[in-house]
């Protein structure tokens, strides 16, 4: 019978060797894609080499740095030591090879620090994927990045996916030979923040690339045999450039035909440079319904074989998902279903979705949740509060 691994019990049963292994640390960067939530995070570079995007608050004020390969390898060895420590404790506690179950009990053992918690979560969810941080690992010299990937896969041979962020501009500057070498070393997928394919908007948000850069970089990644995931930002064009943003982004993606297209809706906070433009009236936010209509226009213009996902918490309609072209009509039908709702029902869904009570449009039929949201809306109106302001406040808490 395995022993439950509670905080005090773990402390008492640790040997010197296990304590030493669990004391290892490694660098963790600030972000990763939503689809890499359970991946092992290895920080290959620090911060962002461009760092001027108007919509991004993450790396502002931080200098970009390339990490030495030896430093990265030491971090990978630290992960290995922590992993071995968790497995040894699991065996001692009677879990045998049921490492996932034992590791799950370490996930919230904060006394061991964030590195142990992170490795425990990775093991508890299978320990099969890894993501190379930070924003543009592809900027590393190709031989050095290959060394990192090779060392990572040698250390953890059970990995079935290694991925990274990259900028289109960087991908476009890499040769097909270099990208194929990275594929051969074990780089399976690249995540690129396309955001928009409209050149005027790319300039306005200071993205540091053009639509042609997006196309060239994306096509090269695909030609090298690396899975490509492109991120689109609905709402980024504001009221002025919404139509062009939708149409031109679809056009660029039609040229690339990536494996995945992911929606990541715009939300502006005071930490973003774009906030100043919003405050002085140079940029005007769309309503949530206008963003939904923009997404419909974008989907209508897509001619791809990609898999579309709406898996970011800021997206209103997360059930927009499917393999194109087969599921195109299904995605449009979800949007039409939402837009055809009466005004009060759309408001109910927006508040409920942002409050975490709804995930899908079908949740509106749950009378208990619907009534809770309705009462909350009445309470806000009784206090002369603007419901839309409350929705923005809720969205701020997501970031």
Image (tube, rainbow, N blue to C red):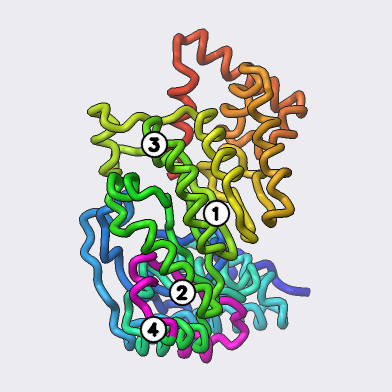
Q: Quadrant of residue 201?
A: top left
Q: Nearer the viewer, mark 1 or mark 4?
A: 1
Reading the chain from its start, which is encountered first: label 2 or label 1? 2
How crowded pointer 2 is (Cα within 10 Å; few <14, some 14-19, many 20+) is rated as: many
Instruction: In the rendered view, tell whether residue 286 sits above or below residue 196.
Output: above
**Figure disc tally:** 4
Report the Cα–Cα distance between label 2 and label 1.
Answer: 19 Å
Q: Secondary structure at mark 2?
A: helix
Q: Nearer the viewer, mark 2 or mark 4?
A: 2
Reading the chain from its start, which is encountered first: label 2 or label 3? 2
- Quarter of the image where the N terminus is located: bottom right
Q: Is residue 16 visible?
A: no
Report the Cα–Cα distance between label 1 and label 4.
Answer: 26 Å
Q: Measured from the top left, where is residue 129 in percent x and y?
A: 57, 74
| Residue segment shown in magenta | 148-176
353 lies left or right of 57 = right
Camera-side residue of 290 and 348:
290
Q: Report the residue at 66% width, 30% height from top.
A: 338
- Quarter of the image where the C terminus is located: top left
Give the labeled residue for mark 4.
145
Q: Measured from the top left, where is residue 224 in percent x and y?
A: 51, 80
> Would residue 321 be counted in the magenta stretch?
no
Report the Cα–Cα distance between label 2 and label 3.
Answer: 29 Å
Q: Report the residue at 38% width, 61% height from top.
A: 212
Give the labeled residue for mark 1.
262
Give the labeled residue for mark 3.
241
Reading the chain from its start, which is encountered first: label 2 or label 4? 4
Give the labeled residue for mark 2.
220
């Amino acid at each position: 019978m395995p022993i439950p691994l509670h905080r005090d019990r773990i402390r008492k049963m640790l040997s010197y060797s296990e304590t030493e292994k669990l004391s290892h640390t490694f660098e963790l960067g600030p972000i990763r894609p939503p689809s890499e939530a359970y991946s092992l995070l290895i920080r290959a570079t620090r911060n962002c080499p461009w760092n001027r995007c108007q919509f991004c608050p993450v790396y502002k004020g931080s200098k970009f740095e390339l990490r030495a390969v030896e430093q990265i390898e030491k971090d990978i060895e630290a992960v290995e030591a922590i992993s071995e420590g968790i497995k040894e404790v699991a065996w001692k506690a009677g879990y045998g090879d049921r490492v996932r179950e034992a590791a799950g009990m370490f996930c919230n053992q904060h006394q061991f620090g964030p590195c142990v918690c992170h490795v425990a979560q990775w093991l508890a969810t299978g320990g099969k994927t890894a993501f190379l941080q930070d924003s543009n690992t592809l900027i590393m010299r190709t031989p050095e990045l290959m060394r990192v990937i090779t060392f990572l896969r040698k250390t953890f041979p059970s990995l079935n996916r290694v991925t990274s962020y990259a900028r289109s501009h960087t991908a476009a500057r890499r040769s097909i030979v270099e990208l194929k070498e990275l594929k051969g070393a074990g780089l399976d997928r690249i995540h690129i923040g396309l955001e928009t394919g409209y050149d005027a908007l790319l300039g306005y948000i200071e993205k540091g690339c053009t639509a042609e850069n997006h196309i060239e970089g994306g096509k090269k990644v695909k030609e090298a045999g690396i899975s490509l995931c492109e991120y689109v930002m609905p709402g980024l064009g504001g009221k002025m450039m919404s139509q062009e943003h939708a149409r031109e982004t679809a056009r660029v993606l039609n040229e690339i035909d990536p494996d995945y297209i992911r929606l990541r809706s715009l939300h502006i906070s005071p930490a973003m440079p774009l906030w100043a433009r919003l405050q002085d009236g140079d940029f005007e936010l769309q309503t949530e319904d206008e963003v939904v209509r923009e997404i419909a226009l974008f989907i209508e213009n897509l001619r791809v074989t990609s898999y579309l996902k709406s898996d970011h918490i800021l997206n209103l309609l997360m059930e927009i998902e499917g393999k194109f072209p087969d599921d195109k009509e299904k995605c449009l039908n979800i949007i039409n279903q939402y837009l055809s709702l009466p005004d009060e029902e759309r408001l109910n869904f927006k508040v409920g979705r942002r409050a975490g009570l709804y995930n899908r449009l079908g949740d509106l039929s749950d009378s208990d949740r619907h009534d809770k949201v309705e009462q909350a809306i009445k309470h806000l109106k009784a206090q002369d509060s603007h419901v839309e302001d409350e929705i923005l406040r809720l969205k701020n808490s997501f970031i």
